Image (tube, grey):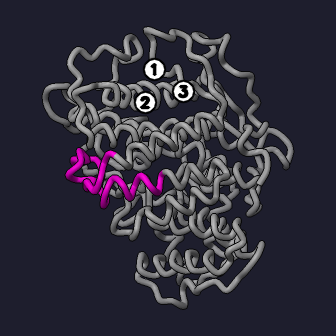
């Protein structure tokens, strides 16, 4: 389920096979590297972030937020909001051990160059923020230090989020104007500069932290066009394919779709006209987005589009930090700060980018003229629609207390008002660090996301 690229050796080069091979045994001794050349292991840190953003975490979030549907076997438990702690073991371990840990090896290595250290700080900061957003309180100050802290303490969610943002900010100061490709991006990532990407990531997490001024400040220096998006790169080799494609086509066919038991996802309903959008698009514009995201498979079900040209095609890149998200962060930050005029500019910049993306006309995605609560709702729903399959949607629905009214799954295991509020602490943590793992409840908001 988590094939991506393989770090062949610490002293060689990066190849392209299943990540389960290069991580085999990592849980036995996460600090087993004898020689850890920073400019080589930075690739593993990048792969861990790519996996976090576009593999199981993203798929779980997309089902919970009613963009997609769990249609078979273990994914039916997601459709019914039935939590299983064992499901989160790999997701937790992959991010901490493959990502945060390898970043620490670089950051703490006195031989690391300023650039590679800055990249590691940006990536590690993003992963710490992601873990705090998904789980609540998580290890931070004592994380990945097994010689000092065999059983690390859990830091408060807000503390981890602030610490992760600070890491990103420090990293931005270290990467200068280095491009993604020149700055150890290799064939894994594409984009403009590490600084632009870092600013958009910092803005994302400042927004999650409720700091609209910092979100706006960072986003003003963030990804400046869709041509500059930080994107994962994929090919036709089995382990190098788009991770949604790998899951849906290569590994678990029929598990993840956009309909289940005759019920279409809310995103399908928004794009096929069943549910009216808060900011309308023309019928042609709706169809362009629908056809990019979905298609009807041979069994008559609505499936996510893994065909050539589809959003989740074999070689399709996947966004880590994008211009569209950056503009919508600015729009929301301005709207929440009472600057509707500025928010409209950013929202309409985003709509103009949709026109360019789909080769549409301005009439297909007309500009907004809204204000107040209507404007804020439009911003949030456009983000929900545009950032299809991205983990940030799960963060946003919880952060905003579902302001845009995405309906719960009709098969949800609890009442109509219940919605998954976090990922559960994995069974592996309860087995090894039970005295420090906080008590959690699947349907109880985490500390940062109790109001909007």
CA separation in Å, label 1 and label 2: 7 Å
> Which residue is disc 2 drawn over?
100
| Label 3 SS | loop
In percent of the image, x 41 and y 43: which residue is there? 170
Q: Residue 314 vs residue 273: left or right?
A: left
Of callouts 1 and 2, the N-terminal one: 2
Find out whether residue 119 is within the magenta segment: no
Find out whether residue 190 is within the magenta segment: yes
Q: Which of 243/57 is in front?
A: 57
CA separation in Å, label 3 and label 1: 8 Å
Image location (x, y in percent) of residue 312: 42, 57
In percent of the image, x 46 and y 27: which residue is there? 96
- Which quadrant, please, contains the C terminus? bottom right
In percent of the image, x 72 and y 71: which residue is there? 338
> Which residue is disc 1 drawn over?
144
Task: Give the magenta part as a residue range.
Answer: 174-201
Residue 390 seen in render: yes
Q: Residue 383 vs residue 113: left or right?
A: right
CA separation in Å, label 2 and label 3: 10 Å
């Amino acid at each position: 389920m988590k094939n991506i690229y393989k770090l062949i050796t610490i002293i060689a080069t990066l190849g392209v096979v299943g990540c389960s091979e290069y991580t085999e045994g990592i849980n036995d001794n996460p600090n087993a590297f004898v020689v850890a050349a920073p400019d080589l292991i930075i690739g593993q840190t990048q792969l861990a972030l790519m996996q976090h953003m576009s593999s199981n975490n993203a798929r779980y979030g997309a089902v919970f937020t009613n963009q997609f549907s769990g249609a078979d076997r273990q994914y039916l438990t997601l459709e019914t909001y039935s939590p299983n702690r064992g499901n989160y073991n790999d997701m937790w371990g992959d991010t901490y051990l493959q990502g945060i840990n390898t970043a620490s090896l670089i950051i703490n290595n006195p031989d690391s160059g300023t650039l590679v250290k800055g990249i590691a700080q940006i990536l590690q900061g993003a992963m710490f923020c992601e873990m705090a957003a998904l789980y609540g309180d998580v290890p931070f100050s004592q994380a990945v230090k097994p010689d000092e802290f065999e059983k690390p303490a859990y830091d408060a969610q807000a503390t981890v989020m602030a610490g992760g943002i600070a890491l990103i900010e420090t990293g931005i100061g270290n990467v200068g104007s280095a491009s993604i490709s020149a700055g150890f991006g290799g064939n894994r990532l594409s984009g403009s500069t590490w600084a632009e990407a870092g600013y958009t990531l910092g803005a994302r997490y400042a927004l999650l932290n409720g700091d609209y001024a910092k979100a706006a400040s960072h986003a003003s220096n963030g990804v400046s066009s869709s041509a500059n998006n930080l994107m994962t790169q994929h090919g036709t080799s089995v382990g190098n394919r788009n991770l949604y494609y790998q899951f849906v086509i290569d590994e678990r066919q029929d598990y993840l779709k956009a309909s289940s038991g005759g019920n279409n996802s809310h995103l399908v309903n928004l794009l096929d006209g069943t549910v009216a959008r808060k900011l309308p698009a023309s019928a042609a514009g709706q169809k362009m987005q629908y056809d990019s995201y979905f298609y009807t498979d041979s069994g008559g079900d609505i499936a996510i589009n893994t065909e050539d040209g589809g959003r989740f095609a074999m070689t399709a890149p996947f966004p880590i930090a994008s211009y569209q998200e950056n503009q919508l962060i600015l729009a929301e930050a301005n709207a929440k700060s009472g600057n509707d005029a500025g928010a409209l500019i950013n929202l309409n910049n985003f709509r103009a980018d949709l026109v360019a993306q789909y080769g549409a006309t301005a009439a297909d995605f007309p500009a907004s003229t809204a204000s107040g609560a209507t404007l804020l709702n439009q911003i949030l729903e456009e983000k929900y629609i545009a950032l299809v399959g991205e983990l940030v949607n799960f963060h946003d629905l919880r952060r905003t207390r579902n302001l845009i009214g995405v309906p719960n799954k009709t098969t949800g295991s609890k009442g109509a008002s219940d919605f998954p509020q976090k990922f559960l602490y994995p069974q592996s943590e309860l087995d090894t660090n039970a005295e420090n793992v906080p008590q959690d409840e699947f349907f109880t908001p985490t500390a940062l996301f109790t109001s909007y």
